[in-house]
Amino acid sequence: MARCIQEWSQRAVVCNGNINCLDDCAKQLRKCLDSVFPYSKNIEFETDKVNYMLSTIFFLASRLAKGSIGLAEFDSSITKVEKIGKVSLEQNENKKLYQKFEHELDEILSKYF
C-alpha cells in the first residue's frame, strides 16, 4: 500500500496541477490499491474492505481529536506554571511545583497519547 501511495505522489507532482494527469494518477492509484485489496465475488469480502477503510479513518480521526485535547491540557498546565512566575523548576524551592507539573504531564500522556 505504501508503494502505491509513493508512486501516486511522485506522479502527481509531475502533473503540476493538470487535471487530466491527476485523474490518470488517481486511476493508477486505484488500480494499484486494487492489487493490494483485490476484488472478490464474495460480497462479505467487499464489506470487509469498506469496514477496514472506514475503521482506519475513524481511528486516525479519533487519535487526532484525542491528541488535540491532550495538547490543550498540556498548554493549560504550562500556563499555570508560567502564571506562578518565571522560576527555574530545577531549584529546590520550586521542586513541589515541578513535581506537580510532572504528574500532570504524565496524566496527559497516559490519558491521550
Image (cartoon, helix red, strand yellow):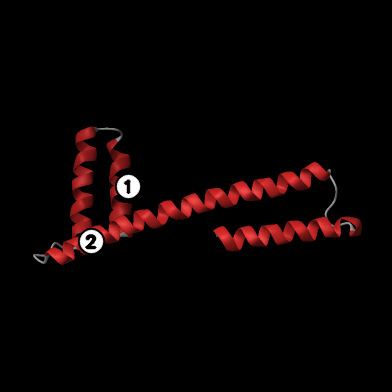
Residue lying at the far top of the rendered structure: 18
The amino acid on which the numbered mark 2 sits, given as a three-letter code, is: Lys
Residue 59 visible in the current orientation: yes
**Percent from the top left, x then y, of residue 27?**
18, 47
The amino acid on which the numbered mark 1 sits, given as a three-letter code, is: Ser
**Percent from the top left, x then y, of residue 4?**
28, 56
**Percent from the top left, x then y, of residue 19?**
23, 33
Q: Is residue 87 left or right of residue 43?
A: right
Which of the numbered marks, if any, corresponds to residue 49?
2
Earlier sequence position, callout 2 versus callout 1: 1
Where the N terminus falls, by quadrant?
bottom left
Could you say whether the residue bearing mark 2 is in a helix, strand or loop?
Answer: helix
Relative depth, front residue between 80 and 38? 80
Q: Is residue 9 left or right of residue 30?
A: right
Residue 36 visible in the current orientation: no
User: Which of labels 2 and 1 is toward the front?
Assistant: 2
Query: Would you place residue 110 above or below residue 85 in this image?
Result: below
Which of the numbered marks, if any, corresponds to residue 57?
none
Query: Would you place residue 19 above or below residue 43 in this image?
Result: above
Q: Mark 2 Cα within 10 Å, few/some/many (few <14, many 20+)?
A: some
Q: Is residue 58 left or right of residue 8?
A: right
- Residue at 28% x, 61% y is 52
Q: Mark 1 Cα within 10 Å, few/some/many (few <14, many 20+)?
A: some
**Percent from the top left, x then y, of residue 62?**
44, 54
Query: Would you place residue 88 above or below residue 17 in this image?
Result: below
**Would you name the residue on which mark 1 appears?**
9
Query: Would you place residue 97 above or below residue 45 in this image?
Result: above
- Residue at 74% x, 56% y is 101
- Residue at 26% x, 60% y is 51
